[in-house]
Image (cartoon, rainbow, N blue to C red):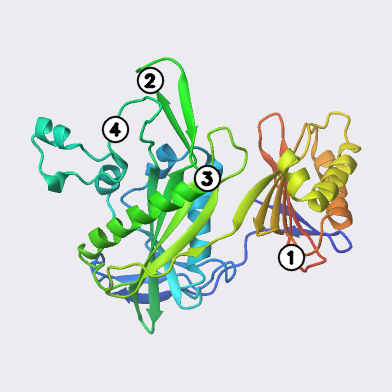
Amino acid sequence: MKKLIILAAGLTLVLAGCAPQLSSEKAVKNDSSTSKKETQIVTKNNISSDYYRTILPYKESPTRGLIVSNLNTRFDINEMEIGLQRIATTKYNSEDYAFQEGQYLTKGTVTSWLNRKYSDKQLKEKKLSDSDNVGLNPVFNGNGTDRNPIYLAHILEQNYLENKGDTVKLNGVMIGLAMNSVDYYQKESYGATYSTPISKAKMKEEGRKMADTLITRMRQMKGLSDVPITIAIFAQNSKDAMVSGSYLSYATAKQGSSELGKWDDLDESFVLFPSDEAKSDHLDDYNWFKSFSADIQTYFSNFNGVIGRGFYEGKELKKITIDIPVNFFGEAEIVGFTQFATDMVAKHLPSSVDVEVNVTTTDNQANASLITRDAGSKTANVHIFDR
């Protein structure tokens, strides 16, 4: 399928066919314990230093699909995975390591760890032993005002394999603990849903207790006794949120150790534009976003509004993702509007920020065009999709 690509510096039009071929892959032997020692392939190219090459044939995690049912929104699902990789880049150089989905935690294991602990009475009634009491969430004590919340929503595993010569070997495991920022529950099996907010301090406290337990358990698993394991605490957002939650802190158990080292706190957040939070906490960014939105709004009388999601490290905006839904009636409209939107990106959006603008059609939510610009660049890359 062909794409029309517009380069913003001068708006040069280029008609592109098939994607360029990548360099040849590299055959390697996998020395990790989950491998059958067959020859595998490491992809030669990665998109950037922020991403890892992968191992082929691609091995899906045994917990595949569990994250979708356990987390509240697609925003949280994406950030839990990508954010954990972002933390991994601080420990494992993407030039020397390849990524693989987690291969050690099974769906049954994760599900059982997400359960509540059993009380002594419940153990006796169910005729279970202490070894069966593996749930990490607190004992159920009723749905009154002193209810024990469900703190832990999901456990995500990622594996990082070091590439040396013609072999790859597991040399890093990343574990994400998704903590609930809101505990949802019903007092009966039907009826109203109640909610209790959980503070970031409490999420950190409970997550760190669980992390200590997880390290001990994982060290007893075949293949994980002698590799570095990092555990990161992720605060997922509420069910009605239009931005994701973020990682709060992480700590690493060094090779062979069953004790986590010092916890490093993260100051990351996602902010919706426009919103009261953006206006009160990031006024300068709020103002240029409003100016951008106002100019965009002048193009079409049937315009539906601009939504932005900003990623912050501390008070510094690092990336803005903008969605523009428009009711288009033809290809020429898409091309014209995309060129105009590209001009507005150059006019209003600060050059220090990574930019992604998604233009979609309101009739079927299909992608119409994509505008991207890297921080520090004066040139935006624009793709107009065939429909």
Distance (Cα) linking label 1 and label 3: 24 Å
Residue type, label 1: Ala
Q: State the SS at label 2.
A: loop
* Mark nearer the N terminus (1 vs 3): 3
Q: CA distance from mark 3 to mark 4?
A: 26 Å
Q: Nearer the viewer, residue 335 or 130?
A: 130
Of badges 1 and 3, nearer the viewer stands 3
* In-image side of 239 versus 103 (left or right): right
Q: In what quadrant of the picture does the C terminus appear? A: top right
Alpha-carbon span between mark 1 and mark 2: 49 Å
Of callouts 2 and 4, which one flags the residue occurring earlier in the amino acid sequence? 4
Q: Residues within 10 Å of mark 2 (few under 14, many from 20)?
A: few
Which one is earlier in the sequence, the residue at label 4 or at label 1?
4
Q: What residue sits right under mark 4 in the picture? A: 140
- Seen in the picture, residue 256 relative to 312 is either above or below; the reply is below
| Label located before the other in sequence (3 or 4) | 3
Cα distance between the residues tagged 2 and 3: 26 Å
Whether the residues at callouts 2 and 4 have beta carbons within 8 Å, the answer is: no
Q: Position of residue 350 (x, y in %)?
A: 82, 59
Query: Quick check: 20 above or below 345?
Result: below
Disc 3 secondary structure class: helix
Identify residue for label 1.
375
Secondary structure of the residue carrying numbered label 1: loop
Which image quadrant for residue 304? Answer: top right
Q: Residue furthest left?
A: 127
Mark 1 and mark 2 lie on one chain; the one further toward the N terminus is 2
Q: Which numbered tag is attached to residue 177? A: none
Residue type at mark 2 is Lys
- Kindly identify the residue that appears in the image at 59 percent across and 69 percent down: 48
Report which residue position mark 3 lands on. 76
**Residue 87 in sight from this viewpoint:** yes
